[in-house]
Image (spheres, grey):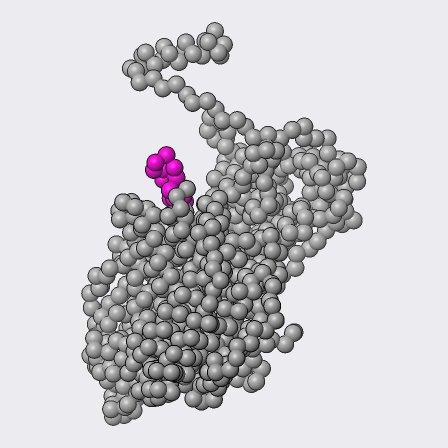
Amino acid sequence: MKIVVCIKQVPDTTEIKIDPKTGTLIRDGVPSIMNPDDKSGLEMALQLKDEYGAHVTVITMGPPQAELILREAYAMGVDRAIHLTDRKFAGADTLATSHALAGALRKIDFDLLITGRQAIDGDTAQVGPQIAEHLDLPQVSYLQDLKFDGVKTFTMKRHIEEGYQMLEVDAPCVVTVLSSANKARYMSVGGIVDAYQKEVEVWGFNEIEVDEANLGLKGSPTSVYKAFARGLKPAGELYEVETDEAVGIIIKKLKEKFILN
Amino acid sequence: MEKIKTVKGGQFLVQQSDPQNIFIPEEISEEQKMIMDTCRDFQEKEIFPLLDEIDSQKEGLMPLLMDKAGELGLLGISIPEEYGGFGQDMNTSILSTEVMGTYSSFAVAFAAHVGIGSLPILYYGTEDQKKKYLPKLASGEFKGAYCLTEPEAGSDANSGKSKASLSADGTHYLLNGQKMWITNGGFADIYTVFAKINDDKYLSAFIIEKDFNGITLGQEEKKMGIKGSSTCMMFFEDCKIPVENLLGERGQGFKIALNILNNGRIKLAAAVLGAAKKVISNTVSYANERVQFKNPLANFGAIQYKMAQQAIRIYTIESAIYRCSNDIQNSMHQLMEDGLLKEKAVIQAQKEFAAEAAILKVASSEALDYVVDEGVQIYGGMGYSTEAPMERAYRDSRINRIFEGTNEINRMLIVDYLLKKAFKNELPLLSASKNVVKELMSIPEFGEENTSLLALEDKLILGFKKCALLITGAAAQKFMKKLSDEQEILMNIADIIIDCYQAESLLLRVKKRIDLKGLENCSEQIAMCKVFFYDAADRIHKNAKDAANSIAQGDELRMILLGLKRFTKHSGLNSKEERRLIAKKLIEENRYCF
C-alpha cells in the first residue's frame, strides 16, 4: 500500500499573541510546529506502515523553512519527503493551495491520501476536501479511526455532531483526520540522525501537473477584508435559584433575545 | 574543514579568549534542536504526569520509564553507532542532558545510567566487553549502576575495604565487601564495582552482572529529596567474578573512577541547568498570577530582583557549561587528529578540562540552590506546600552540592588541578603570577581608552584574573606543598577562579550573541553581564582580601591589597534598573526565555 500525507507548518498558536493595535497575529519569534491534525494523520499512516508495511510519503507546500517538518516526519519514520516550493505558489488561499497540491499528487502513485482536518492558523478545513474534488476521488472527512482489511477496503469511523458514522470505502480515497484520532509518536534519536542523512525532494511549478492560472495570488478568489481580535464578552448574570425557577428565567431571556418565540 | 583552535584546560586564567572560539546555545543546529524536542516531549508527557508516583517509588515504574527512554534512543546518545548507539558529539550529549535534567528523580536515574553506569565500559572496556554490554545499555535492556562509595570511604574513595581475591585456578575473583549510596541499585542489571585486589594500594574496577552469586541488596534509602531515585546498599559475599570482567588494568580503578567523575561533573551541571530553567519558568508564571495588594507579585521590585537574579545566575552558568563542552569536543578532535583512539581522546580531553568541570559542578549546584530557594520564597506559603512544585524542587536540589564529589572537595580540586598543571609546566600560571607582581611594582599603565559597549567588563575580566593569579601565586609560594592544609584559603582561591571562569564565559557569550543577533536583540543579556560583573568585582575582592590577610604581612600584604583594589575597581552601576529590565522580559514572556 502507498500512502501520501499532506502536512503543513504552522505557528504554534498556544504561544501566539495578538497586537492590540492592529488586531493581527504577532508571528515574530513564535515557534513553528507541524499542524496537530496533520501530525495525527501522519501517525495514522505510520501505524498502517507498522502493520502492513505501507510506503509513506509526506508532502508540504511552503517556504524554505518548512523543510523542518519534513525532517521531523523523516525522524518519525516516513520513507519519502517532498517539499513543494516556488514563487508561483506564493499568496495562495485554500483553493490555490489545493490546486498546487493536487498538481503534485497527480505525479505520485497512492492508494490513500491523508490530510489533517484543518490547520490551526486558518481553521478552514477546506484543503483536504478540495484536493479530493480536483483529483475526483471519494473523500471522508473528520476521521476518528481507520482500519484496513489488508486487501483494498478501509473501515472508517467518522466524527459527526451527534456521534459517529461508520463507513466502508475502497482505495484509492482521501481522508481528513482529527488530532484526537491518536497520540502521535515521538521522533526517535536514531530517526533524527537518519533524517538529516536523507534527501528532501524539492518540487517547483515545473515538476507538477497544474494550470498556472489556478496558482498563487492569481488563483486565489479569497481576499481578507479585515482581521480583528474578538472583543471580550461582558460578564454573565448569575442566578442562584431552584431548577424550576432557573428554567423560567432562561426561557424568559431567550424570548427577550427573540431566540424563542 | 576549518582548523579548530583548541584551547587547553586552565588556559582561561592566563590568556585572553576569543568569542569566536566558544560555542553558545544560540548556535545549536536544527538537528540538535530536534533531539532536544524529543527529550522535552518525553519529559512533559511521560515524566511530568507521574512525578508523585515516581517519588513514591512505585514498583517497576522507574525501569519502565527507562525502557521508554531506551526505545526512543535517549540512552544511546553518546554510545558509538558500532555499539548500538547514535555516536553524538559532546555538545549534543550535554544539550540532551540539560533537557533530561528537568525533573530530578528521573534525571538522576537517567544520568547515572548513561554516565557512570555506561561510560566506564565504553572508555575502558575491552572489545569483547563493549560488544557484550554496550548495545544493551544503549537500548535500556540493561540498566547500569556504579559502586564506589563505602560506609567508611566517601570522599576518600581509595580507602575502601572491599577486596577481590584471585582464585587458585586463576579463572575468577571472589569479591567481599559493602557499597553504599548506589544510584539505580534497586533495579540495575550491570554494576561497575571498585575494589582492591588482594593487598593492592589502588582500586581495580570490575563489571558485575546482577545474576552473579553472592550479591545482596539493602533496603531503599529514605532520602530528603530525589525520592524516586533508587539508592541502595549492596553487599558482596564471595561474589564470583570471571577474570574477563576485570575492567581496565589491575590497579587502574581509582584512575577510572576519577576520570569518569570529570564527565559526571559537567553532566551534573547540565542537568542542574535544565532543572533550574523549569523552576524559573514556574516562578515567573506564579509571580504573574498571584495577586496581593491588588498587584501581581511580579509588579513588586523585591520580587523582580529575585527573578532577575535567578536568570543571571542560570544564563551565566549556561554560558560556562557550553563553552567547556565545546572546548572538550575540540580538544578531543585535536587528540584524534594527533593519532589517539576515540575513547582515549575523550578521556584525555575530559581530564584536560578537569578544573573547569569542577568549577561547573560547584557553580551550577549552588546556582540551582539559589534558584529553588527564591522559588520557594516567591511562592510564599504555597512554596512550603507539597501541592505546589517548589517544595519538591527545593528538596531535590540539595543533593547536587554533595554527590559527584562534595563542593568542598571540588573547590580543592580546582586549585589542585591548576597547580599540578603549573608544576608540570603545562600551564604558565606561576610566571603569569610573577608578571602581576611585577606590574604592581611598576607605574600603572593606563593604555588606550576602550570605548566599546562592554569596555568596563573587558577591563575587569583582566583584573579578576590578575586577582586570581596574584593570590594563587602568593599562596603557593608561602605554603608550598603544605597549601593543601590551608583549606580556608583554598576555598577563597577556588571561589575567585569560579567567578573568573563564569564572568569570562558570560562576557564572551554576550559578545558573540551581539554578533549573531544584533545589538537590539541583546539588551537583557548585556544587562545580565553588567550586573554579574558588578557583583563579582566585590565578591572577588572580598575573597582575595580574606586570603591575602591569611597569607602575607607587612609591605607584601599592603602591596597585594592595593593591587586587589585596583584590579576590582568598578565605576558603579544602577543594578536596580538593569535587574528590572531583565525581570520585565521574564514577566512578558511568562517563562525563562534567555
Question: Is B200 placed left or right of B283 in the picture?
Answer: left
Residue at the (39%, 75%) spot, across then down: B561
Q: Is residue A234 visible?
A: yes
In this picture, which residue range is highlighted in magenta? B285-298
Q: Nearer the viewer, residue B146 or B172?
A: B146
- Residue A183 drawn at (x, y percent): 46, 46
Residue at the (43%, 88%) spot, across then down: B423
Q: Nearer the viewer, residue B325 or B48?
A: B325
Q: Is residue A6 magenta?
A: no
Q: Residue B489 appears in which quarter of the rendering?
A: bottom left
Question: Is A224 placed left or right of B182 in the picture?
Answer: right
Residue at the (78%, 49%) spot, across then down: A206
- Residue B76 drawn at (x, y percent): 45, 67
Q: Is residue B290 magenta?
A: yes
- Residue B442 drawn at (x, y percent): 51, 82
Q: Nearer the viewer, residue A130 or A138?
A: A130
- Residue A115 drawn at (x, y percent): 59, 41
